[in-house]
Image (spheres, grey):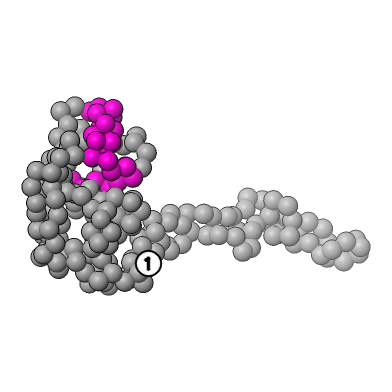
Amino acid sequence: MALVDIINTQGEKVSEKELPDSIFNVPVKSSVLHEVVKMQLAKRRAGTAKVKRRSEIRGSRRKLFRQKGTGRARRGDIKSPVLRGGGVVFGPYPKDYGFNVPKKKRALALKMALSSKLQSNELVVVDQFKMDRIKTKEFVETIKTIDRPDSLIIIDGEDRNMELSSRNVKGVKVLRSRGLNVYDILRFKNLVLLESSIESIEGRFA
C-alpha cells in the first residue's frame, strides 16, 4: 500500500495513511483515460443547435410566378432554400452526441486518474477542512497555506459553507466524493482529498 502524509489546514504533517494499491497504484494507460474523458465531454454537449428547414418556415406555398415565359429562373414558393429567408438545407439539427463506455472501463479509468495524481506527487490528504461560515477570503487563505493552487478538493458529503465559499475562486473546485470523475481529476493540477472522503472513494469500488 502507498503511504501518504496527512496534513492540516496549516500545512503541517499530523499523521500518515495507507492508500490501497488496487485504487491508487494502478498502471496508467492514456488511451483508456482519453476514451472516458471523450465520453464525458460528449454527454455534456447540449446538441440543441437548430436551423429552420423548409417545412418550418412561415410563408405562402404559392408559386411566385409562372413556370415559363418570364425569362427568369424557375421559382417555387417563397420558402425555397435558394431564396433569402427560406429554409436551410444542411444546417445543424438537435441530436445526442453521447456514447457509452463499459462500466468496468469507466471504473478502471477513475482508478488510473487517481493513481496518476499519486504517482506525480499531486495528491495531498487533509485531515479536515472546516469552515464556520461562508467566507471566500478565509477559503483562499487556507488554499494558499497548504500551497495547492489549481486544485480539485474532494469532500465526503454536503458542506454548504465550503461549497459556497469556493464557488467564485478561480482554479479551485469543491466536489463531493459521489461526483468524483475522470475529467475533473485530470483538469486540475492538484487533487486534495479530505481524509473522511477516502473511505467513500473506496466504497465506490467495493
Q: From the viewer's perspective, is 55 left or right of 17?
A: right
Residue 167 pos. (x, y %): 31, 37
> Residue 77 colored magenta?
no
Identify which residue, 28 or 158, lies in the foreground: 28
Q: Position of residue 70 (x, y in %)?
A: 90, 61
Q: Secondary structure at mark 1?
A: helix
Q: Residue drawn at (23%, 59%), measured in percent from left and top? A: 118
Q: Which residues fall within the magenta stretch?
A: 134-157
Locate residue 116, reporting x and y percent.
27, 62
Q: Which residue is mark 1?
A: 34
Q: Where residue 136 sits: x, y (%)?
A: 28, 29
Q: Determine the residue positioned at 19% across, 66% down.
A: 25
Pick the residue in front: 70 or 21: 21
Is residue 107 visible from the viewing direction of this image?
no
Closer to the camera in the image, 180 or 11: 11
Hey, what amino acid is under mark 1?
Answer: His
Name above or below for residue 62 compared with residue 111.
above
Q: Is residue 152 visible?
A: yes
Q: Quadrant of residue 109?
A: bottom left
Residue 102: image quadrant is bottom left
Quarter of the figure that contains the C terminus: bottom left
Give the residue displayed 29% in from the left and 50% down from the top. 190
Q: Quadrant of residue 129?
A: top left
Q: Residue at x 48, y 59 (%)?
A: 94
